[in-house]
Amino acid sequence: MKAANDQLEPSVQNAPVDLGRDIFLRSLLRELAGTLESVVGVAEASGYISVVGGAIGEQIDASYRAALKVDRLDRAQVQDVLVDLKRRIQGDFFIIEEREDRIVLGNRACPFGAFVQGRPSLCMMTSNVFGSITAQNLGYARVEIEEAIATGHPGCKVIVHLKPLENIEPNTREYFRVED
């Protein structure tokens, strides 16, 4: 139907609502994380999200190893996979530094976009995906999220330590190879 000014009246189908599958799923995850953080606390919410991140990390690792036709990724492949998997989900990770005992990654764009703001428990997805892939292929990982967009930093800084320590830092998580 035409209105008095000869323009189409708004309808549900052409309403300017910013909603699609991606926006819906990121909103869902944000609200789920927020609910967990407010009900059980950030530390416990991070624990729950860690379980999901670990399972997703295993799936991603298996996919890359199958695609590359290898039983285990070497160190260079692990680094490439960590950057590539985030690129595929619209993150912008890059290698800052590589040493014998660590890989330091930076990030300019979170895959969760603005939905990650104020939801630090969602960073456990990165920690667990990076940790499980690295440990499964290289034997061990300890992941430290030094800076995070979720906590107000302009970018992220993630350190993947490759050598175990006797006493680990309180803000890190350890990962070990699970034998096949």
Image (cartoon, grey):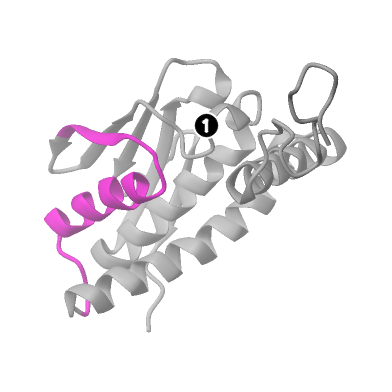
Q: Nearer the viewer, residue 63 or 48?
A: 63
To which quarter of the image does residue 23 belong?
top right
Query: 13 or 162, which lies in front?
Result: 13
Q: Amino acid at mark 1?
A: Gly
**Residue 72 is inside the magenta segment:** yes
Q: Give the x, y percent position of residue 177.
A: 37, 68
Left/right placement of residue 168 relative to residue 66 reads right
Q: Secondary structure at mark 1?
A: helix
Residue at the (63%, 38%) spot, across then down: 121
| The C terminus sits in image quarter | bottom left
Q: Residue at x 75, y 30 (%)?
A: 8
Depth check: give the residue in front, 156 or 162.
Answer: 156
Residue at figure coordinates x 78%, y 16% from the top left? 5
Percent coordinates x, y for residue 144 in the rendering: 42, 36
Residue drawn at (65%, 43%) of the image: 46
Q: Quadrant of residue 115?
A: top right
**Is residue 132 found left or right of 18 in the rendered image?**
left
* Residue 163 can be seen, yes or no: no
**Residue that mark 1 sits on:** 113
Query: Would residue 83 be seen by someone viewing this image from the given angle?
Result: yes
Q: Residue 151 location, x and y as percent? A: 56, 21
Relative depth, front residue between 86 and 178: 86
What span is in magenta?
Answer: 71-97
Within 10 Å of disc 1 (Cα), the crowding (few <14, some 14-19, many 20+) is: some
The N terminus - image quarter: top right
